[in-house]
Image: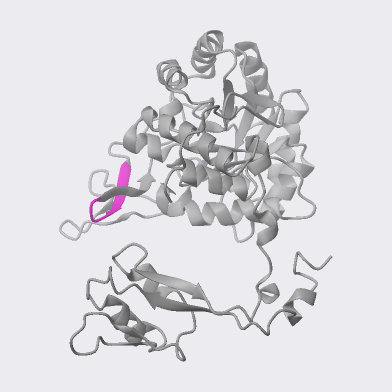
Amino acid sequence: MMMPQQSLNPINLAVNVAGVQAPNPFWLASAPPTNTAYQLLKAFEAGWGGAVWKTLTNNPIVNVSSRYGAWGLGKHKLIGLNNLELISEKSVAQNCAEIAQVKTEFPNHAVIASFMFETKQEWQEAVKACEQAGVDGFELNFGCPHGMCERGMGSTVGQNTALVEEITSWVKAVTRKPVFAKLTPNVTDIIPVGMAAQAGGADAVTLINTLNSVMGVDLQTLAPQPTVGGYSSHGGYSGLAVKPIALHMVSQLAMHPHFHLPISGVGGVGTWQDAAEFLALGASSVQVATAVMHRGFSIIKPMLSGLQAYLAEKRLASVSELSGISVSKLVAWEALDLNYQVKAEINAETCIGCNLCYTVCDDAAYQAIAPAPAGTIVPVILDEACVGCNLCSHVCPVTDCITMVNKTPASADVLPWMKHPKNPRHR
């Protein structure tokens, strides 16, 4: 997708998410890039609208070395990142002193404190300390899938709806500032967890946290990666590769009729297009970590200009007008139009004759493509056999060489699916 041309009068990207105001919806997620005042000052200077401080706790934290494992594909590095890193190694007092420094220099940028504690007293005492430092809100880390969950925190809490509700209520009992519950994706259904956070009084939710994972195995040493003295452990998976999972979970909560909280979307945001997709499926802001760990804080500049131009192109006056705009287009499978038909078409002028489309269709799909006839390099679509599965268009190495063309019969104007009770047009 090409970036639209920048409008002459850029749209104001300011957001208000559950009472947390920020100059734009691009926030840094609680992660290594938000560990120090130095980093946040640098990030806000670059243009980021907010940040969630790296998670605070009272227990002494010692991290391993090494701690990151990367998955790439060809020339593309860090499509996925696995980390064994734990939360902040600094005391609550040290972190609060740095938070206060950031809020002094950037009072209009959102700074949210992330928490992970064991006892009710610890949760509530940390709230008071961070309020004195000037934080704009709190994020409850119910999602970390490694290291901390073995201690009864993180995703161990996030997988227990009763604990999610209870701990959220502890924090809400001692603060009037907005409270975000950060949810783990390591569950079979995100809805009960989101509803538990809402029942506990949360003002918003953040999702997703990292996915439980093992990055791979070094086939020479046979040690899993990343390796710590020849051994490894399961870690948290993030990066571009998790975006479809994150979009699914964000949209699940956004479209649920009884869930009414704002959502801060996380997981695979690396461009303004990624952010726009999260917003369209129900997020009110987005958080970024792995993309910054890959390319640095400067990625915010094209994010800001790209989103501004996109909103102008779509004649949307604000970020909030984009938020949730696509949710109604997600329906139950049985509400989809079974009369809608697309067929593949090959552009003979751009086809390079690699025959990959023929190979995959013949081996793995519907045998709807024939080899190129003598004297040509262009395979032939067998229209009567093509079911519109899209596979050929996805594997073709030439952009837009294979397109899917609407061939829905003209007689299908009034369709049974339109009367299905799960069809959003059936009201």
Q: Percent x, y for residue 335?
A: 70, 73
Residue stretch in magenta = 68-75
Where is 4 relative to 411, above or below?
A: above
Q: 26 or 259: which is nearer to us?
A: 26
Residue 147 highlighted magenta (yes or no): no
Where is 253 relative to 353, above or below?
A: above
Q: How many marks?
A: 0
Q: Is residue 144 visible?
A: no
What residue is drawn where x is 65% and y is 27%?
Answer: 123
Residue 73 highlighted magenta (yes or no): yes
Q: 32 or 346: which is nearer to us?
A: 346
Where is 327 relative to 353, above or below?
A: above
Q: Percent x, y for residue 110?
A: 59, 23
Residue projecting furthest to the right: 427
What residue is drawn where x is 33% and y is 38%?
Answer: 294
Q: Percent x, y for residue 251?
A: 63, 54
Q: 69 or 382: which is nearer to us?
A: 382
Q: Percent x, y for residue 34?
A: 45, 26
